[in-house]
Amino acid sequence: MRILVLSFYYPPDLSAGSFRTDAFVRAILNKHSNGVHIDVITTVPNRYSTFSSAAKEHEENDGLEVFRIKLPLHKSGMWDQSLAFIKFFQNANSIVSEKKYDLIYATSSRLMTAVLGAWITTRIKARLYLDIRDIFVDTINNVLPGKATFFLKPVFSFLEWWAINKADKVNLVSGGFREYFELRYPNQKFSFFTNGIDDEFIESRHINIEKKEKKKLIKVLYAGNFGEGQGLHMVVPMLAKKMQGRVQFVLIGDGGRKSQLKSLLYNAGCKNVELRDPVSRDKLIKAYCESDVLFLHLNDYAAFRKVLPSKIFEYAALGKPIWAGVSGFSAEFIKAEIENAVVFSPCDVNEAANVFENLDVNDMKRPEFISKFTRKNIMELMVNDVLSICKKGT
């Protein structure tokens, strides 16, 4: 069986899509070491302009061939990301022009990788499985200017309709997506395999369940994107100022709102926030383990009430207290599944400060959560689901 995997991000790039795709590919190769060949089409590491990691444009190992497309430099703006994807689309089509596949798997957050999968499926008549990690049509209402949304939303709505209907089956990463997709596509078959906990986080836990000595400053760490979707610029400057003398924030990452965040921190006179550039995963885990509390925030947009950030899983696995500014499905998930975690309404500084008092600033074990959401177990089940569409009669 020949399988094509499409993912805009792939190791050594740093993103949820990269880690998820890597786990998926390894799960297939572990389960079907003979008789399966996988081509992965992805990009040369490009998510952050401040972080790069060397990767060959073409690699080949037993049963696996990786094609990395080199993209122009971008800083996460909508225009430069669009140009980058156009190049990805063109080069991916060129790579597969003379190839045949039994199955195409496309994992997509911003819709267009799903559209690419549908386009290639149309050309080569393969089965298509889509892994949807975001509702882009929903999100553009919040991230694009009103006039742009007016013209572009019908276009992206059509592309979503076309891609979803081309697929033999669709996986939704968040249960919060269920209503949106089932109402619009009642004839499609959906699965719900979430993100999960990678082995690195399970193996790297340094949990001390003894009570810690009270510190003058509690180290609060956030790691991830500094974009409009995360909305750090909407909450951290005021929250840090409010909790100055008690909390030290460490923010690791990059993104389109980084410069605005820096400016707002400066204007607020925050002396308790440290901004760091993205780091490799092993250094990131070390930074997690050195922190006291892990921070998460999504902007106050209706679209984000449906999502379930992958960050939640790695945070919870490390046993640290979690301080999360989320709403909707994410808030319900945290309350139901994770001990020693508090939730506040996005961008609400006063509520954030109030709920912080309910945290026990000590590490704890979460064995039930880890058992339930280990990525390896989730991916083994998902591989079975993906391969099932190639069986006769499906």
Image (spheres, rainbow, N blue to C red):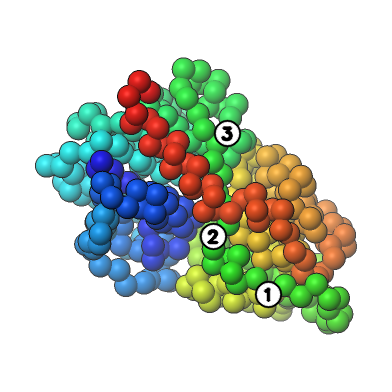
**Residue kind at label 1, given as amino acid type:** His
Q: Residue furthest top?
A: 187
Instruction: Report helix, strand or loop for mark 2.
Output: loop
Mark 2 burial class by Cα count in 10 Å: few <14, some 14-19, many 20+ = some
Q: Which residue is mark 1?
A: 206
Q: What's the mark number on residue 177?
A: 3
**Residue at 53% in and 76% down:** 283
Residue located farthest toward the front when viewing the structure as drawn: 34
Q: Which residue is mark 2?
A: 198
Above/below status of 366 relative to 147: below
**Image depth: mark 3 or mark 2 in front:** 2
Q: Residue furthest left?
A: 98
Judging depth in this view, the residue of 197 and 310 nearest the camera is: 197
Residue closest to the eye, 239 or 97? 97
Taking the spot 32% from the left edge, 46% from the top edge, the residue there is: 5
Picture layout, residue 388 above or below residue 44: above
Which percent across, then down, holds residue 263? Answer: 60, 68
Disc 3 from disc 2: Cα separation = 23 Å
Estimate the spatial distance between the alpha carbons at disc 2 and disc 1, rounded to whole Å. Answer: 16 Å
- In percent of the image, x 42 and y 29: which residue is there? 169
Please identify, in this view, whether the residue under mark 1 or under mark 3 is nearer the observer.
1
Q: Is residue 39 left or right of residue 236?
A: left
The reply to whether the C-beta atoms of the residues labelled 3 and 2 are less than 8 Å apart is no
Q: Do the numbered discs 1 and 3 sit on residues whose CB atoms are within 8 Å? A: no
Which is more N-terminal, label 3 or label 1?
Answer: 3
**Which label belongs to residue 337?**
none
Q: Earlier in the sequence, mark 3 or mark 2?
A: 3
